[in-house]
Image (cartoon, helix red, strand yellow):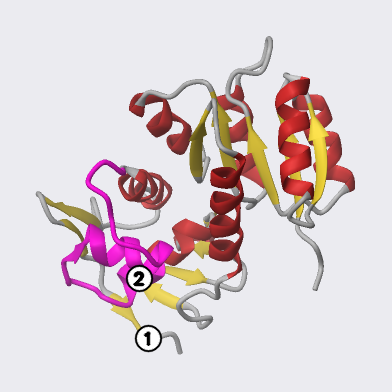
Amino acid sequence: MTLPRILVVDDDSRVRDVLREGLSNEGWIVHEASNRAELLETIRTHDVDLITLDLSLQHEDGLAIARELRSFRNVPILMITGRGAPFDRVTGLEHGADDYVAKPFLIREVVLRIRRLLGTYRQPLLQSEPIRFDHSTLDPNRGVVDGPDGVSVGLTWHEQKLLQLFAMNPNRVLSRDDIAIALTGREWSPMDRTIDVHVAHLRRKLANMSDVPKMIRSVRGVGYVFTAEVHPVA
């Protein structure tokens, strides 16, 4: 089995030292970067399985880096940062990160969160066959939704799994618990807005690919319902 490669991105060498030692003790291969240029060079030359990212890099915007990463690489991103307020956590998730650990941290918590993210990304999608909804088609094998007039949009792993869950349960109200269990294998926490963030991202990507004004509708106090018509793929 190939050992996971973890890229630690932080401008504080002391933090990188702690993470390198702790993650190496798990048998993982650890790369380090102190800025955006080093990060991009590392992922260009190595097949990185997960990135830990400090949002407060010196003279650089960690949120912008997370958004840039998510635009071209479907790799799990774990924020490790001194910004500990709930608003900062949600902002990081909105920019493409998958999870959040606040400084000062326990290395064991970091290890557990990395294990969970690696396991999540390795899970098979709900089904591998294309799904047609409204005038668009989700191809899980490519991670792309092909819409009318040749328009296509790429999805992250979480967005693919979320869209599959909705399309396989059309017109059924799915609670946040239902969605959390399908996406992460654990129940939803009322303080966790991760699901809402993923739904918002998916809505924006699908907004111009359907005649349906909002195919993913909110059900107040419960969850969401997928209202687009789902067709079998011939």
Q: Helix or strand or loop: what does disc 1 sit on? A: loop
Q: State which quadrant residue 22 falls in.
A: top right
Pick out the residue farthest to the bottom: 234
Query: Number of labelled discs?
Result: 2
Which circle's residue, 2 or 1, is located before the other in the chain? 2
Horizontal placement of 187 versus 15: left or right? Answer: left
Q: How many neighbours does mark 2 have within 10 angstroms: few (below 14), some (14-19), or many (20 or more)?
A: many
On screen, residue 139 above or below 45 = below
Q: In this view, does 87 lie to the left or right of 56?
A: left
> Is residue 3 inside the magenta stretch?
no
Indicate which disc residue 175 carries.
Answer: none
Q: Disc 2 to disc 1, how far (Cα)?
A: 15 Å
Q: Mark 2 points at which residue?
A: 165
Residue under label 1, please give it.
Answer: 232
Query: Does the rendering let one see residue 134?
Result: no
Residue under the image location 37 percent in, 69 percent down? 182
At x 58% / y 44%, what residue is drawn?
Answer: 110
**From what the image shows, is residue 5 above or below residue 136?**
above
**Residue found 77% across the figure and 51% down from its top:** 25
Q: Nearer the viewer, residue 210 or 71?
A: 71
Q: With 125 as the anchor, is 7 left or right in this view?
A: right
Magenta part of the protein: which range?
A: 163-192
